[in-house]
Amino acid sequence: MTAPPSLPKFRQQSILAVLMACSLLIWLDNTVLSTTLETLADPVRGLGANPGQLQWATGSYTLAFATLMFTAGALGDRFGHRTVFFSGLVIFAGSSLWAAYASDAGELIAARAAMGVGSALITPANLAILMWTFTGPARTAAIGIFSTPAGVGMAAGPVLAGYLLDHFWWGSVFLINVPVAALALVGLAVLVPNFRSPTLRPLDCAGMLLSISGLVALAYGLIRAGQVALWSRADVWAPIIVGLALLALFVLAELRIKVPSFDPRLLAQRTFGGGNAALGLLLFAVAAITFYNAFYLQGALGFSPMKAGLANIPTALGALAGAPLGSRLVRRLSLRPVAVPALTVAALTMGGYGFLGLQTPPVWIEILLLIQGLSIGMVIGPVMAALISTLPLEQAGAGSAVTNTVRQTGSVIGIAIGGTIMSIVYRRAIEPSLEDVPGPVRDQARVSAEQARHVAAAIHQPTLAQAADDAFIHAMHVGAGWIAVIALLGAAVLLITLPAAGKKGPTPEPAYEEPRSSEARAAQEPQSVMESDR
């Protein structure tokens, strides 16, 4: 078994362009939906989706992504990474088309879950093809260039979604995926060899089924609590208990098999486990506060989708600046004195939503979002790089699977719990204003502030719309307080588990270095089988 032959430089660059286009596609899709949530909740311009359905529209994608991504790597080893990548793009494009023309919220949720399946197949294959295509210093440079679509997607996604929503119907935000995917499919077929590892990892079917069913049951129970506003009902606590039990079985099953796709043993390591726990808590908070922000800007403040997209640019710019700034500070000071204060500041900015209201000047919102993006950027990149660097090279793939799964799971649970808190508090706050309102109107106004504003306009009751706005602001304040506590807990975990500044701790380093000899290069390069791409 030999290392893959070196490809011509032009072909390497062309492959990198295809991979970056696909990465941009995933990042755009991750950001455009948050701008679309308010429109989807509108009974006239959207689907009239209630908060629980919107939570599932966001969470079903992330859930499928989180639970299938570590299985996708094994599929790539077995069938070839290009084959898996190609299949993922076809699924992603087809389900995007399905989502664009969904006739109701249930259909949209199903389409979003299918999109998550496609993303899960694309993401590991994307990185694997990058690793096989480049070697030595060229690989390190390619990895740096490969990270740029994340920032572009974060900044451009909300603005692009805002433009489309202002000029077209809501489904147009999903149609933008189709032509990009079509071009990427051509590039894959023409340019990319079908790299695959000669060492096949077993498919972890039991782990996949347990993780999916456990997370679905847990998320269902948490979201259902927000819909019925009671935790004592069997359809709330029973799914939560079943979900936790299934996830416990998932961990036990992964501990028993020889080559687990998700290795829980890695989480027992102090720095790696603590860092992942902190990242999971941070992504929990980010997902929840992003969910709130979408309804605050477009619903309570009445921003157009385009204006809301522009308003979110400071978050993306802050994250773009924060990642390299955090890395430079870590090299000078070590990780803990950088990551802990940055995560604390991020938590405080999330708590800062508790001071926003209907009359808050936009400039204060922009400053808050800029600081939030900057502080989050200073945490995620340096912590992830440091965590992977604590592991031996042969465990880097397993560690990456654990880290990505924990992050995506944190996002799923954050959307579920954050949305549930908002729904419960809103319903209790709006109730006193509905005493003299007719029954059908009362039932619709209880669902969400979006539904209340719509029915208030239909029956010419501006006081009801004002009451809905006030109830939403109160719910956002309460939810923001809890979200800030969760993020502060993440900062506390980092403080406890990361090495002190004076000790030799993990520092982010390039994952691969140029070997000093041809013999060392042959020993260090991953071995693969490269099928003919003709």
Image: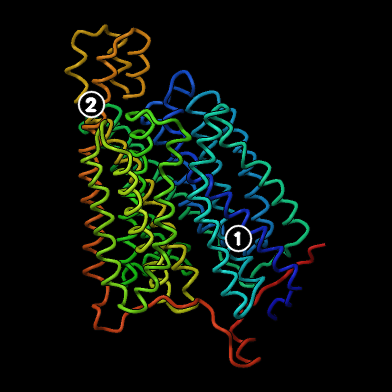
- Under mark 1, the amino acid is Ala
In the displayed structure, 66 sits above or below 234; it is below
The disc, 1 or 2, on the residue closer to the chain's N-terminal end is: 1
Quarter of the image where the C terminus is located: bottom right
Q: Secondary structure at mark 2?
A: helix
Quarter of the image where the N terminus is located: bottom right
In the displayed structure, 279 sits above or below 246; it is below
Examine the image and state in which quarter residue 374 appears. bottom left
Q: Secondary structure at mark 1?
A: helix
The residue lying toward the viewer, choosing from 135 and 463, is 463
Residue 416 image offset from top left, x and y in percent: 34, 40
Residue 401 in the figure: left or right of residue 524: left
- At a point 35% along the width and 63% down the height, the residue shown is 379
Q: Which residue does the numbered mark 2 point to in the structure image?
A: 470
- At a point 30% along the width and 48% down the height, the residue shown is 368
Classed neighbour count for the residue bearing mark 1: other residues with Cα under 10 Å, few (<14), some (14–19), many (≥20): many
Residue 13 image offset from top left, x and y in percent: 69, 67
- At a point 23% along the width and 46% down the height, the residue shown is 352
Q: Which residue does the numbered mark 1 point to in the structure image?
A: 125
- Under mark 2, the amino acid is Asp
Examine the image and state in which quarter residue 187 appears. bottom right
Label number found at residue 514? none
- At a point 47% along the width and 69% down the height, the residue shown is 258
